[in-house]
Image: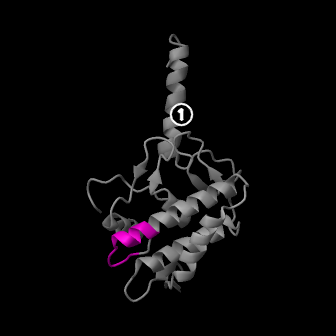
Amino acid sequence: MSAGFPDFRLGNVLATSFTGTLSERHGDAVERVPTPGRLADWLTVSGLAVDSCTAAQLDLARELRESIHVAATAAALRDALPASAVRVINDRSARGRAAATLTPGGERRWRLGQASCVEDALGVIAADAIGVIAGERDGRLALCASPTCRAAFFDTSRSRTRKWCDMNTCGNRQKKARFLANRRENPGSAD
């Protein structure tokens, strides 16, 4: 992994994890794939290893990321999906030539084109986004309750009432803020 960059926030759903490569969208935004090499790193840890990535491919990836975020946000709010976002997602899905393969251990892996190209990896991500946004999985799209984050995430909790995209970051931050506010309001309370 490239040193000096923020850690990746990986989840169980490829498409929403990909949108998490830009976090704190409503605060001090954190770009987790600022360079083509860093995008290649993210694709590798996500099971979509590519040989290399260009600046133009990074631009395509960011366009897809933002389109997925906009469409997932609309779906979570039960709003109409923006036509421009749908167009980008569909285009990236159609251009990808990846094939799903089954490992001897019974897991799905992706085989990208001979050149292990970024466009194939983006096609896999776009296809995953289509499945999630179309409601083809058991779960629901939701938005992080953190006012600075508002990331779209896929809630597979039993009650479907999860509030945070990541309990270890947004959830902890909000709980800590609430605790400190309570302490300021009630300075004599016991620990």
Q: Position of residue 38 (x, y in %)?
A: 34, 64
Q: Quadrant of residue 73?
A: bottom right
Q: Give coordinates of residue 83: x percent, y percent.
A: 66, 66
Q: Nearer the viewer, residue 23 or 90?
A: 90
Observer able to see residue 98: yes
Number of other residues with Cα within 10 Å of mark 1, as a class: few under 14, some 14 to 19, many 20 or more:
few
Is any atom of residue 44 visible in this view? no
Residue located farthest toward the front when viewing the structure as drawn: 84
Count up the numbered dots.
1
Task: Give me the residue at 51% from left, 67% from top.
Answer: 64
Residue depicted at x 39% and y 68%: 58
Outermost residue, top side: 188
Q: Amino acid at mark 1?
A: Lys
Q: Is residue 51 magenta?
A: yes
Q: Foreground residue, 25 or 174?
A: 25
Q: Is residue 71 left or right of residue 97?
A: right
- Residue matched to label 1: 175
Membership of 76 in magenta stretch: no
The quadrant in which the N terminus is found is bottom left
Q: Which residues are magenta?
A: 49-60
